[in-house]
Amino acid sequence: MKIDSSFNNANLPISNKSVNRVSQSSENIGANVSASSNVQLSEYLQLHEAKAASIVTFNSEKVEQIKAAIADGRYQVNPEAIAETLIATAREILKTQQPIA
């Protein structure tokens, strides 16, 4: 499984984010408190949010096959393949990280 590194949350602009909260006075603590919030997302974040929503995160059919294999005792783990993939992913992440100045 390859991890998509095109979305880097460290580069998200937050200057367009605004939050307003309104609540009742402190005299009414414990009473029915109402609150409202208004959040505006930057265009960059909206674009990536829409992109993320369209990506299928898992294959439910494959999950069910793996569950059945585990339940039947047929599932075999390949530790070499897991280790190789983990190392490859770590190398890719390290390549994409920018050095701290």
Image (spheres, rainbow, N blue to C red):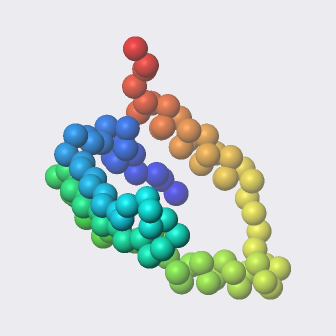
Give the x, y percent position of residue 60: 52, 81
Given residues 71 and 54, the one toward you in this image is 54
Which of the 4 image quarters holds residue 96?
top left
> For the image shown, how many numbered marks are present on the structure?
0
- In the displayed image of the protein, which residue is found farthest to the right? 73
Give the x, y percent position of residue 99: 43, 20
Tell me: 37 left or right of 2. left
Give the x, y percent position of residue 13: 25, 40
Give the residue displayed 34% in from the left and 48% down from the top: 7
Give the residue displayed 78% in from the left and 83% down from the top: 71
Give the residue displayed 61% in from the left and 46% down from the top: 86
Which of the 4 image quarters holds residue 57?
bottom left
Tell me: 50 left or right of 9. left
Q: Does 34 sit above or below residue 3?
A: below
Give the x, y percent position of residue 92: 48, 38
Is residue 101 at least partly visible in the picture?
yes
Q: Does 49 sit above or below residue 66?
A: above
Quadrant location, the C terminus:
top left
Tell me: 87 left or right of 98. right
